[in-house]
Image (cartoon, helix red, strand yellow):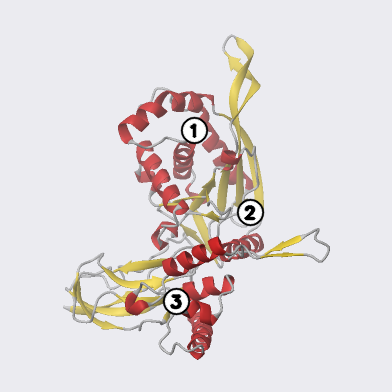
Amino acid sequence: MKIVEMLMPPMGESIMECTVLTHLKNAGDSITADDSVLEVATDKVDTEVPSPYSGVLTEWLVKEGDVVAIGSPVAKFQVENGVDQESNAPEPVLEAGTPEFDAVAFLENDLQKAVHRTSELETAQSVLKSSGDANAFYSPLVLSIAREEKLSAQELASIPGTGLENRVTKKDIIAYLSDRGSKKEILPIKTSSVNGSTEIIEMDRMRKMISSRMIESKRISAHVTSFIESDMTSVVKWREAVKNDFRKKSGDSITFTPILIEAVVKAIKDYPLINISVEGDSIIKKKDINIGMAVALPDGNLIVPVIHHADQYDLAGLARKVNELAKKARENKLKADDLAGGTYTVSNIGAFGNLMGTPIIVQPQVAIMAFGAIKKKPAVIETPQGDLLGIRSLMFISHSYDHRVVDGSLGGMFLKRVSDYLENYDAHRTLL
């Protein structure tokens, strides 16, 4: 038997820390791998953390309420000899000849941020306790929502909690705000100007986050965008022929999105150097193909859930996964794992009637592809008997990539390969 440490796993793109809400297991409990042992909160979601080990939980290294950096030890386990102590630590694959990423410095930087965040949390908690509730505890997610919605400490303290020890959860505060909003027209907060000709609308919490990340991405990556017009006639005819039968047999719809994702996955296999990220002066080449798909939410905001190991799904599986993630996103049911680990992102802007766009890269990825609306247009059709003029279903594809590490040749060839897969689509393939 030996003692190993469990590390706080990644919680999603750009999330460097989280707050421990609840210990779901006690020291001395026997644990099976993938049992949930912790409930944590990030700025995006509250979620449960599974154990990477089977064994006995011997000691907690963090307390409820602690702000913990991603990658930090949170618990100790007694396990059988032969279990890899580092099995739950992700190991990036580096390009040959590149220097190793300084993980120690990275984690030290995260810990400094965590200390600062802990100080902010303690200040907020002390203010809440001064309002009269000496036992109040609120997660950073709840505090963040309260701050953005301008709830007073007294109003926050009045919300009945359904969590452990009657703590206020994200669902509690959202339900309260929904009821509050139905009684008073204060969300979103609006202020008219003196002359009544303009209106000030405050950004909500997610919009501020999106704004910050988009600006940061433009600052980090040298964006350049290439375009191509692709003939989607075969795809359109094939989907029209199979969609009703697919719905009857599977209960799911087959949209264009899984077809587009399938073409991207095939092209990534042909050009794996598009499936990378940058850490300092190191290029991290990813073996897994995890496709992020931009989803527009009912409130107008945007979120990017991830299809992990997208290359391991057939088209029917991709269709089901796309529908599942889109539904979870719109119902606010995504978990941290659903948002983590993306290596390449697609956006179907054609759903909004847009012909083309210049999408912004999701950090730390190096490329993103946007698919425009499919429009019928007159086009020249080349045949062995000569050129003809006909009506074709055409679509513009936009490919933004980071020119620091992706040159125009790679970015352009990858885009052309995606188009080739779509234009040469097998109109006779079976789906189920």
**Where on the picture, by quarter, is residue 427?**
top left
The x, y position of residue 326, in whole percent, is 45, 48
Number of residues whose C-alpha sits closer than 10 Å to that of mark 1, classed few (under 14), some (14–19) or many (20 or more): some
Residue type (three-letter) at the residue carrying disc 1: Tyr
Q: Which residue is located at x 60 percent, y 28 percent?
A: 394
Q: Nearer the viewer, residue 319 or 216?
A: 319
**Which numbered mark, 2 or 3, is in the foreground of this view?**
3
Q: Nearer the viewer, residue 392 or 365?
A: 392
Q: Nearer the viewer, residue 153 or 63?
A: 153
**For residue 378, above or below residue 49:** above
Q: Which residue is located at x 56 percent, y 12 percent?
A: 384
The x, y position of residue 187, in whole percent, is 60, 63
Q: Earlier in the sequence, mark 3 or mark 1?
A: 3
**The C terminus: image quadrant:** top left
**Where on the picture, by quarter, is residue 403?**
bottom right
Q: Spatial distance from mark 1 to mark 2, Cα to Cα?
A: 24 Å
Q: Is residue 105 visible?
A: no
